[in-house]
Amino acid sequence: MTQTRLAQQFEFIAEVDRLKQVHRMTSPIGLERRENSAEHSWHVILMAITLAEHTNHPIDLLKVVKMLAIHDLVEIDAGDTFHYAKSADTDLAAKEEQAAERIFSLLPPEQKQEFMTLWREFESRESAESKFAHCVDRIAAFFLNVGNNGGTWIQHSIAYETVVERNQHAAEGSTTIWEQSIELINQHFQQAETSRS
C-alpha cells in the first residue's frame, strides 16, 4: 500500500515538473527570455509569505501557500493564457477543469480530492485565503512590467484603465497592497507618457 501510494506521488511530482516548460508573457526583470510558470509559482508563494501581514482578513497562510503551489499546474495541459486575453478564450474554464482532473488524478485519492478542492477554492475567489492568493498572483506581473519599462503592457498596448480594471479584484485580498500597487502602475504610465512627449 505504502509503495503504491509513494509511486503515485512520485509520478505526480515527475509530471508537474513540466510546468517549467510553460512560458508566460512576462519576462524576469532585466532578462529577454520569458518567465516560466514554475518560476511564477515560486515568486507568488514567496510574495504571500512576505506580505501576509497586509491581508484584509485573517488567513491560514499554509492554505494560501498550497493554493499558490498548485494554482497553475493546469497550464501543463491548458497552456498559459495572457491575462488580458482570457475573455476571448470561452473554453478556458473547461480546459483547466479537465487538466486539473487529469493531473491531480495521478495522486492517491484523498490527495487528489484535497488538491482539487484547493484549486477550485482558488478559482472561486470567495474565501479570505483565495482572495489573498489572487491578490499576490495579480500583482506579481506588476513588478516584472515596471522593472522591464512596461514589459507586456507596452508590447501589447495595454491601456492604464485596462490594467486597473482587470486587476482591481486584488483589493479583495489586501486593500493596502492594491493601493501600493496602484502607485507602481501610476509611476510607470506617468513615466511612459513623459518619455513620449
Image (cartoon, rainbow, N blue to C red):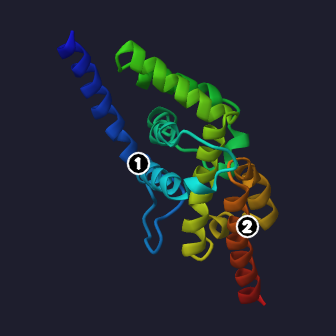
Q: Residues within 10 Å of mark 2 (few under 14, many from 20)?
A: some
Taking the spot 68% from the left edge, 45% from the top edge, the residue there is 57
Report x, y in % for residue 127: 67, 34
Residue 196 visible within the image: yes
Q: CA distance from mark 1 to mark 2?
A: 26 Å
Q: Please identify the residue farthest to the left as the structure is shown.
A: 3
Picture residue at 47% right of the left edge, 39% below the top: 62
Q: Which quadrant holds the C terminus?
A: bottom right
Q: Quadrant of the N terminus?
A: top left
Q: In terms of sequence position, does the residue under pointer 1 or pointer 2 come before the other? A: 1
What amino acid is at disc 2?
Ile
Left/right of residue 173 with respect to residue 116 in the rendered view? right
Q: Is residue 184 above or below residue 109?
A: below
**Of the pair 174 and 74, the residue shown nearer to us:** 174
Q: Nearer the viewer, residue 45 or 96?
A: 45
Residue 38: mark in rendering:
1
Task: Name the one closer to the observer, 149 or 121.
Answer: 121
Q: Which residue is mark 2?
A: 182
Query: In the image, is 187 to the left or to the right of 113?
Result: right
- Nearest the viewer among 140 and 81 is 140
Closest to the camera, between mark 1 and mark 2, is: 2
Residue 26: give x, y in percent of width and height. 53, 60
Where disc 2 sits, the SS reads helix
Where is residue 184 drawn, in percent x and y? Answer: 67, 72
At horizontal 66% and vertical 60% (from top left) the residue drawn is 177
Q: Which amino acid type corresponds to the residue marked 1 in the rendered image?
A: Ala
Residue 160: numbered disc = none
